[in-house]
Amino acid sequence: MSKVPTVELKLPILKNMELVATQTSEVVSKHMDLSEEQSDEISMALIEACINAFEHSETKNEIYIHFMISDNELTIKVIDKGKGFDASKIKIPEIENKINTKERKRGWGLMLIKELMDSVDFESDHTGTTLTMVKKKTNNE
Amino acid sequence: MSKIIETNLINNVVVIKTEGYLNNDLGEEIEKITKKYIETGNKVFLINLKDSKIVNSIGASILIEIIEQLQDIDGELVLCELAPIIEKTFKIMGLTKYCSVYGTQDEAIKGLA
């Protein structure tokens, strides 16, 4: 079995480092001949995945991002070695519940990732979290 | 990296033009300016995001806070010149249910007249 071409990034927990990830995803998207719309969706999902890893994992270490390139799809893994999270406690945010209420305005990350990517999965325990998201290649007209 | 590049008062509309990543920092800058203008009696705000091509949900969440503040005074927040991915993100979040979006600044100013 041939090895999947993979681009690997290691990001320190520093302000705006998620933009380093989006620059890489843009190059990868271009290489794969993905549409501009798809490339933008990947970048946006990646920003949210990085912010989640930076903030919610409470890790002091780096996060790792793997871009796995295949003919039909791009698979991105965002890996942190933080405290993990309980998926059952995540509420789907609704703006009606956030506006003019005391509910915190944030918490959109996972919902945006799910909407922007073709599939999203995560494994999480007390040793860290791996979020896997996939964008399928569609034929450019 | 990201900043407010212009603030103008046009036909009683406070126009705030940004540049760069709409993140926590830029969101807070916008909120600060908005508060300042609310204190002097302004109620209608237009944010021109032509030169902000990228956003995160924290920056967008601050816009929700601004919408709340404006609702309290019967004010309005309007957006224009959004990059397609920003418009899509705001739609997913439901933000566009609470603020109008225009293609250009001129259209927005005319629409608010």
Image: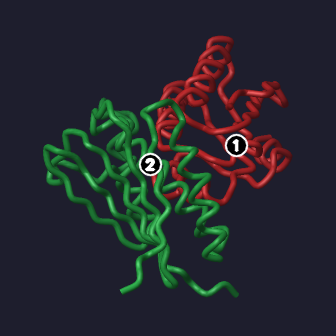
Chain colours: A green, B red
Q: Position of residue B35 (x, y in %)?
A: 59, 18
Residue at 55% of width from left, 35% of height from top? B23
Tell me if mark 1 has few (under 14), some (14-19) or many (20+) residues whose alpha carbon lies within 10 angstroms of its own. Answer: some
Three-letter residue code for mark 2 = Glu
Three-letter residue code for mark 1 = Ser
Residue at 46% of width from left, 56% of height from top? A8
Tell me which corner region of the image, top left, top right, bottom left or bottom right, holds residue A33. Answer: bottom right
In the displayed structure image, the side of residue A79 where residue B86 appears, left or right: right
In the displayed structure image, the side of residue A1 where residue A90 appears, left or right: left
Asked if residue A110 is positioned above or below residue A15 in the image, the reply reads: below
The image's mark for residue A121 is none
Q: Please report, as a chain letter, where disc 2 is located.
A: A
Tell me which corner region of the image, top left, top right, bottom left or bottom right, holds residue A104. Answer: top left
Q: Position of residue B62 (x, y in %)?
A: 50, 32
Q: Nearer the viewer, residue B108 or A131?
A: A131
The residue at which mark 1 appears reads as B52
The residue at which mark 2 appears reads as A48
Q: Nearer the viewer, mark 1 or mark 2?
A: 2
Tell me if mark 2 has few (under 14), some (14-19) or many (20+) residues whose alpha carbon lies within 10 angstroms of its own. Answer: many
Q: Are marks 1 and 2 on the same chain?
A: no
Tell me which corner region of the image, top left, top right, bottom left or bottom right, holds residue B70. Answer: top right
The answer for how far apart the CA atoms under marks 1 and 2 are is 17 Å
Q: Nearer the viewer, residue A43 or A97?
A: A43
Q: Quadrant of the C terminus of chain A?
A: bottom right
Q: Position of residue A9 (x, y in %)?
A: 47, 51
Q: Please report, as a chain letter, where disc 1 is located.
A: B
